[in-house]
Amino acid sequence: MKCVRLLLLLSAVAAGLPARSQTTPGGNASQRAVSLEKAGKYAEAQQAWLAILAGAPANAEAHAHLGLVYALQGNYAQAVPSYRQALKLRPGMSGVEMDLGLALFKQGNLAEAIEPLEKALKQAPNDARPRLLLGMCYYGTARYASAVPYLRAAVEQSPTNLDLRLALAQSCLWAADYAGALDEYQAILKQDPNSAQADMIAGQALDAKGDILGAIAQFRTAESVAPQTPDVHFGLGYLLWKQGQFPEAAREFQAEVSLEPKHGQALTYLADIAMKDNQWTEASEYLQAAMAQPRPIRLAFFDLGLLAEHDKRYPQAIEEFKRAIAMEPEKPDAHWRLARLLQTMGQTEQAKAEFARVRELHETKAERLIQQMAHLRSVTPQ
C-alpha cells in the first residue's frame, strides 16, 4: 500500500484532534489572556502571554498557554518549544504532554511524539486521544507490533472507521499476526464488500500462511472490484510468477506498468520473464528502466548479471552478481553464478570460496508477497 494512504489517514486523525491545554492560571493579566484565547483572538492572546512572560519568564502556565495559542494558529513549530519549556519548569503539568505530543504529530514528527503521548496516556488512562495518536505514531514509524493494541482500542471506540480498520489490518499483517489481519479483513468486508485494500491484505496474509491459491483468489477479487488500485496487478503478478505462470504474470506486470510506468519491481519481473523466454533485448530495456528508479531490488542486479554473462561481458557480470550478493548474501543463486564465472576466468581460489558458500546455503524458496510489497512502502516492517 502506498504511503499516500498513510499520509491521508494521519492528516485525518490530526485534523480531528484540536489542541487544548488544561491549565488555568490566575491573575488579572492571565485572566485577560485566557479570555482572548477563548474568544478566538489568538494573535492578541499570543501578545498577552508574551507580555506576561517578559515579566515572569518562569511562569509555566504562561508558556503552556503560549504554546496553545501558537498551535491554535497552526504554528506547531513554535508551539513545541513553549510546551517543552512549560514541562521543564513544571514536569507533569496536566494536559501539556498531550498538547506537546499532538503538536509533534501534526508536524509529522511521529517518533518524537511517542514519548509525550505515552506520558499523556499515563496521566489520563481513559483518554482515547493519546491512545489513537500512539497507534498512528507506531504505525507511521513501522513499529507495527506496538501499533496493534493501540489501533485495536481505537477501532473499538470507532468500529465503523474503515481507515482505522485498514491501518489495524495492515499492522497485524506486517507484525506477522496473520490471523488478526484476516479477522480485520472479515470485519472490513461487512462494511465494505468491495474493499480492494482489504482483499490485498488478506491475500498477503494467506500467502504468508502458505495458501498461495487462496492468495491468488483474493488478489483476483481485488483486481475485479478496483483494477486501478496501486500494486494490485503487481501483487497478483508476483503470485503467478511464483507459481511459474509466466505469461499470465507478465500480463499483470504490464497492467501495473500501464498504471505506473516507473514501477521498478514490475519492470524487473518483466525483465526476468523476458530472459526466461530468451528475449534478451527486451529484458535489457526493462532492466534499464528498472535501474532508473530510486530503489532497485536484488533481482534486478542478479538479472543484470545474467544479461552481462549472456553477452560475454564477464567482468561486468561479476560486479552485478556481487551487488546482488551484497543485498541478500543468504541466497545461493548469485554465489553459484559468481563461482562459475570466476572459475571460467581462472580465478580458482575465489571460485572455490564461492562454491563452498553455495554448499553452506540451502536452496531458497521465492519470497512471500509481503516481503515484495514491503519494498513498495515508505516504511518497512521491523
Image (tube, rainbow, N blue to C red):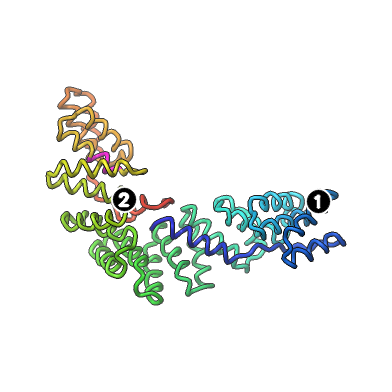
User: With respect to residue 253, does 195 lie above or below?
Assistant: below
The residue lying furthest to the right in this view is 28
Marks 2 and 1, how far apart at CA: 54 Å
User: What is the span of residues highlighted in magenta in the rendered image?
Assistant: 298-303
In this rendering, position of residue 75 left or right of residue 255: right
- x and y, in percent, of residue 280 in the image: 15, 41
Which is the main secondary structure of the residues drawn in magenta? helix
* Residue 263 numbered tag: 2
Contact flag, marks 2 and 1 (Cβ < 8 Å): no
Q: Secondary structure at mark 1?
A: helix
Residue 301 magenta = yes
Give the mark nearer the N terminus: 2 vs 1. 1
Residue at 75% x, 56% y: name it.
46
Quadrant assignment for the N terminus? bottom left
Q: Report x, y in % for residue 379.
A: 43, 51
Mark drawn on residue 35: none
Which residue is identified by label 1? Answer: 53
Question: Type of residue at label 2?
Answer: His
Question: Where does residue 317 sit, x and y in percent of width and height?
Answer: 22, 32
Q: Is residue 182 above or below residue 283?
A: below
Query: As drawn, which residue projects farthest toward the bottom?
Result: 190
